[in-house]
Amino acid sequence: MSDVLIAPSVLAADFAVLGEQVREAELAGADWFHIDVMDGHFVPAISFGAPVVRGIRGVTSLPLDVHLMIDSVDSQLEAFVSAGANSITVHVEAISDPAATLRKIRELGVRPGLTLRPTTSVDEVLPYLDLIDILLVMTVEPGLGGQELLPEMLPRIELLSGRLRQIPGESILVVDGGLNESTITQAVSAGAQVIVAGSAVFGATDGISAALARLRVLTSV
Ligand code: DX5
Ligand code: ZN
């Protein structure tokens, strides 16, 4: 049995019935929820903020990984921790002192995660691998669900997965963007340990449970 985890991204959920969809995904075996926060500055779109995280916290006990696609990271951390985040993943491009921000996230009692845009060099994150619990590799440009995975990111997953294994501890490699039935096995083969999937789960025409079951089979090969 594979131990690859699946983290549905609620960005693709139907917000009119968000709680029901989160519960359905949990019952269908989701491992974490991935929560995309966008501020209209770091990325063009605005999604939602801490009150929505609090709402999701109220309907599931699964880990909530908050992916902050925002500029003012440091001033917002407490709000997301108090809303119920279990981990907070920040963009290296958005923070002036990554080590300080990552330490602050840990001091607040949640797991620190670091990520980078596809166009950002991996050299930007390498100095911080011993400070993080989660390394998130973006396989699309952040800011929008439903895009196609950039295949040139697969070697990046392999490289960073190798580097992460050299660091003592339990850090985990998460892959985010364009993951679906056609691309998931490539990401897992390259070293993904957590698969974020938005439209492939919440946009499936035959429903959340069927979609999760199909993805689960593909992570087990
Ligand atoms: C993109 C977000 C992703 C997005 C993934 O900015 O970080 O988490 O929700 O959506 P899909 O799985 O549809 O590519
Ligand atoms: Zn995300």
Image (spheres, helix red, strand yellow):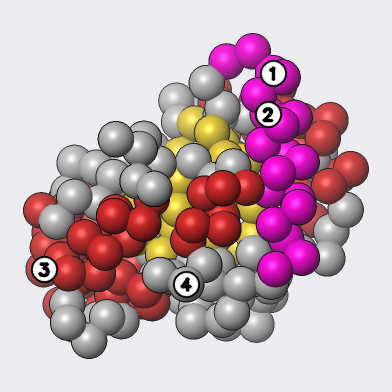
Callout 4 crowding tier (Cα within 10 Å): few <14, some 14–19, many ≥20: few
Give the quarter of the figure containing the N terminus: top left
Q: Residue 65 lies in magenta, yes or no?
A: no
Q: Which residue is mark 1?
A: 167
Find the distance from the CA under tag 2 to the CA under tag 4: 26 Å
Q: Which residue is mark 4?
A: 182
Q: Which mark is residue 115?
A: none
- The residue segment tinted magenta is 151-169
Taking the spot 40% from the left edge, 70% from the top edge, the residue there is 181
Q: Nearer the viewer, residue 173 or 75?
A: 173
Find the distance from the CA under tag 1 to the CA under tag 2: 5 Å
Q: Which mark is residue 164?
A: 2
- Whether tag 1 and tag 2 are in contact, CB under 8 A, the answer is yes
- Whether tag 2 and tag 4 are in contact, CB under 8 A, the answer is no
Q: Which residue is mark 3?
A: 20
Taking the spot 76% from the left edge, 41% from the top edge, the residue there is 159
